Image (cartoon, coloured by chain):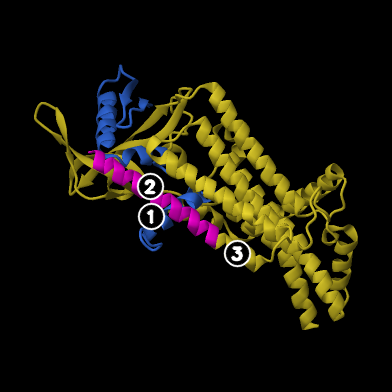
Amino acid sequence: MHFFENLPEKLNLAYSLLAGTLFSQFIREDTVISHEAKGVLKNPADKILIDDTVQELKKDSSMKKKKITLSDDTEVVINIS
Amino acid sequence: MEFNIALHTIFYVSIFIIPGFLLRRFYFTGEFNKEFSQGNLMERFIWTIFSSIMVLLASSFFFYLLRVISGKKLLSAISYSTIKEIFDLLSNNEIPKSSKFFLVYKDFLILILGVYIAAILIGIVFRKAALSNFLRSLFPVLKYKNYWYYFIRGKVKLAPKESGMVYWYTDADILVDQNGKAKMYSGKITDYFINSETNELESIFLEDTNRYKFDDNGNYQLVPIPGHTLCIPFNRMLNMNLTYVNREKNQSWKRNVVWWLIEISYYGLVFILVSLFFLEDFPFIKLNSILDKIGFSINTWVLLSIFKAIFQNIVFPIESSKRKVTLTANIIGVIVSSIQYLWIFDIYGFFSVLGLTAIVFFILVFKFVNVEKKEENSKDSLK
């Protein structure tokens, strides 16, 4: 295996180092869709689940929040205000 | 004579205009960008001068505190005698001697760098304060003119607030006029544009958009609209209903306290690093030139950022799939940054360390990608 094999992966690792530590400090946290929500909504299955939950909460005004389980087994309580 | 006038002008602009300009530039960023150029020229000019004077007072106070707290001498460029010398030099209608010219103007550049850094930091801090609900309610003067920001983010007073919630996004149901017929669209607000003079909404952008399809009984179903983003101009909107989608905080208060302790310690240390730059001697550390000082400050900031990321990942563990890559990247970052101290402390020359850094970096990355590949192959063979 020579060095230039998988070069994009190596460069990706270098980028993840910079993005994860230095540049992330300068990313604006006040985008309309928060960075955290964007990360979760990237997954199509989770997006459908969240959209359905929001619609369900909108329809049933007696229900203010609902717990869902995302594809990585994280439990999230969604609330609409 | 003309040359002196130019010098005076440059001096006054550098002292009384640019700091205020920088403060306002960093205060009005992002969605408030258009407010930077709002108002008449005279009003903006007065705000700029006022902001510059505020920055000058704040930086004088900062330098005074730094001297008192550290007990060390400040850089000669920031001393009273140097500042007086610069003023004297500019007030005399004569070209200074070349030796003096370079000495004084070098000092002037360092001094003005300190003032500009203070202007940028004050601008960022004021912006943070203006976006904080609590501080904005205490000081309403901080409120931006772009009131759509507060409506779209659910930061209006009327929006019900529940404690322990984190804002995720805003869902909008928009009734739109289409050739005399009303149609309703639903989607996540991804962006919006306002008029640069009136701050009125011009257009709004939705993603994951659906169209409401009603039947005769008033029941509806959502029909997805193909495409990434839907733009709705404000002049076609009849009404808009916003729903703020939040996530409940599931972290324990202890973890939150540790998180904030890490944040405060990090920014405290970065502040000390910036402050150290303006001292004649670094406490406990011997650095020979101003380049070494800059190198030390930047490299230590990089190291601190990596350690902050490592500690925060321990407090709030990230997804298991990303954990290994992040940890490896952070370890490589620590090793590469630590190597830089070899040239900062004059143990090896700059270019030797640069070469060494490149070799170490690529060996570590190569090794990591190799191990990853082998693991993937072994997983595939087990399947």
Q: Would you say the residues marked 2 and 1 are in contact, meaning their CB atoms lie under 8 Å apart?
A: yes
Crowd rating for badge 2 (residues with CA inside 10 Å; few <14, some 14–19, many 20+): few
The residue type indicated by label 3 comes to Leu
Which of label 3 and label 2 is nearer to you?
Answer: 2
Q: Residue at x 81, y 48 (%)?
A: B283
Q: Quadrant of the C terminus of chain A?
A: top left
Choose between B6 and B289: the one closer to the eye: B289
Q: Nearer the viewer, residue B270 or B319?
A: B319
Quadrant in which residue A8 is drawn:
bottom left
Percent of width and height locating residue B132: 56, 36
Range of residues picked out in magenta: B359-383
- Quick check: marks 3 and 2 in contact, CB under 8 Å? no
Which chain is mark 3 on?
Answer: B
Task: Identify residue for label 3.
Answer: B354
Residue B175 in the image: above or below residue B54: above
What is the chain identity of the residue bearing mark 1?
A
Q: Is residue B98 left or right of residue B230?
A: right
For the residues labelled 3 and 1, say whether their Cβ atoms are less than 8 Å apart: no
Secondary element at image label 1:
helix
Task: Characterize the local packing of mark 3: few (<14), some (14-19) or many (20 or more) Cα atoms within 10 angstroms.
Answer: few
Percent x, y of residue A23: 51, 51
Taking the spot 49% from the left edge, 53% from the top edge, the residue there is B364
> Is residue B35 in view from this perspective?
yes
State the separation of the CA atoms marked 3 and 2: 27 Å
Quarter of the picture containing the N terminus of chain A is bottom left
Residue at mark 1? A9
Q: Which chain is blue?
A: A
Say if labels 2 and 1 share a chain: no
Amino acid carrying label 2: it is: Glu
Q: Quadrant of the rendered structure where residue B366 is? A: bottom left
Q: Is residue A28 visible?
A: no
